[in-house]
Amino acid sequence: MSLEARGVTHAYDGGDTRVFRDVSLTAGQGDVVAVIGPSGVGKTTLLRLLGLFTEPADGVVRVDGEDAWALDGEDRLALRRRVGVVFQEASLFDASVARNVEYGLRVRRSWRDRVRDAVADLTGDREHPDAVTDALDVVGLADYVDTDADSLSGGEAQRVAFARALAYDPQYLLLDEPTSDLDPRNTAVIEDAVTAAADRGIGVVVATHDMHQAERIADRVAVLLDDSVIEEGPADRVFSAPEDDRAKKFIDGELVY
């Protein structure tokens, strides 16, 4: 069981501006794969392809062996629902922390369950699902259930966004620069949450320019440079003995883009 991009190519402007070509990447359940590279190299675009938001110009994206773009409508949507995404900037609703985390669960329920939830909201009889409180516990915000999301710091908001993706128990989780501009404490909490997700059997792909973070949390690392993955392998090997000279220079800070 895996989330896989095989030989994918993506371009803008009708193919005139190529982002990357012939990129392959696989995340099995329980894996943490870090995609590293400078800003603008295409890390976010690769996550969008893996998340089935964008169709590649060439190549295949498979979820548990199924070619996602060979499917239509509800079948592809069913695959997409196996993949959770946390974007670089948390986008929270003007509601409580719990309601934000519960959002993913609510949209996946039947219309009858949604009506029942709405009635319970009005009467005050509905308790938060266990998945919500469990996800908030993972990111250290179990006591923030009824806190207004607008009152959170940037780091706390990002942790809520992580909990929201975790709550509906995805098989795979895509993280786009999840700790960008966060303080060390919030960074450590999110890194611990990544490890906790992997321990649950969730396959995680992290796009980051922070090589130290990739070294701390990743099982495998892919180096995205010069419009392709130039190096991929176990994190300890890639950081200690990269085989591609460009990868070595990038990791050593000698190659600047």
Image: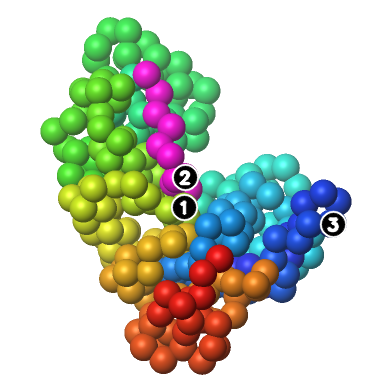
Location of residue 214 by image quarter = bottom left
* Residues shaded magenta: 84-94
| Number of marks drawn | 3
**Pick the front one: 167 or 239:** 239
Instruction: State the image quarter where residue 159 is shown.
Output: top left
Instruction: Give the residue at mark 2.
Output: 87
Q: Are marks 2 and 1 in contact (CB under 8 Å)?
A: yes
Which residue is labeled 3 in the image?
16
First in sequence: mark 2 or mark 3? 3
Q: Is residue 153 left or right of residue 105?
A: left
Q: Callout 2: helix, strand or loop?
A: loop
Residue for point 72% across, 70% down? 21
Find the distance from the CA under tag 2 to the CA under tag 3: 27 Å
**Residue shown at the point (72%, 42%) measured from the top left:** 73
Going by the image, does 109 lie left or right of 127?
right
Residue in the picture at 21% in, 53% down: 184
Q: Which mark is residue 176?
A: 1
Q: Is residue 157 visible?
A: yes
Q: How is the image coloured?
A: rainbow
